Image: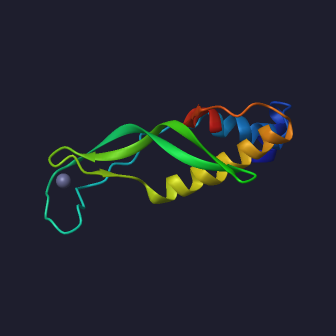
Amino acid sequence: MLRLKSALYNISVEDLIREAVKSYQKEIPLLESCLLPGDFCDGGMEVIELPYSVPFKIGSHVQEIVVTDVPAYRCTKCGDIQRDVELVATIEEVFNQEMEERLGSHEPLPSSISLHDLM
Ligand SMILES: [Zn+2]
């Protein structure tokens, strides 16, 4: 299916995948309920966007760069905020690659970057 579509639209498989990933959008899956450790809370979770600060090492210097628009969960009852651990780990990985590339091509590092600009 992938190769056929790539041939049909005369686009390389790599470009097709890139385009497909770019246009792919869905609702962020909801957490069912608050998992506040220790205390019991039966609050529901809502999705919010919360900046996430990533320490980036340049030589011996560490610079904090803020990734904006990162989805997180907030309890509507107690206000507890939870991050998606896997999402955060993946952001750090992709973020580091992106910053290494920018350093490699002598581009200045931003003080903040949108999650959408990492995709
Ligand atoms: Zn709660």
Q: Is residue 108 left or right of residue 21?
A: right
Instruction: For residue 86, say whether it is visible.
Output: yes
Please state which of residues 77 and 4 is positioned toward the viewer in this rendering.
77
Q: Is residue 102 left or right of residue 26?
A: right
Residue displayed at 43% across by 54% down: 84
Residue displayed at 76% across by 52% down: 59
Quadrant location of residue 11? Answer: top right
Residue displayed at 76% across by 38% down: 16
Instruction: For residue 119, say whether it is visible.
Output: no
Please state which of residues 66 and 72 is positioned toward the viewer in this rendering.
66
Q: Is residue 119 left or right of residue 40?
A: right
Residue 12 rendering spot, x and y as whole percentages = 85, 38
How many discs appear? Answer: 0
Residue 83 rendering spot, x and y as whole percentages = 40, 53
Is 69 situated above or below 44?
above
Model colouring: rainbow
Quadrant location of residue 63? Answer: top right
Residue 23 rendering spot, x and y as whole percentages = 61, 32
Residue 51 rendering spot, x and y as whole percentages = 45, 38
Residue furthest to the bottom in view is: 38
Residue displayed at 42% across by 42% down: 71
Q: Is residue 98 left or right of residue 71?
A: right
Q: Quadrant of the C terminus?
A: top right
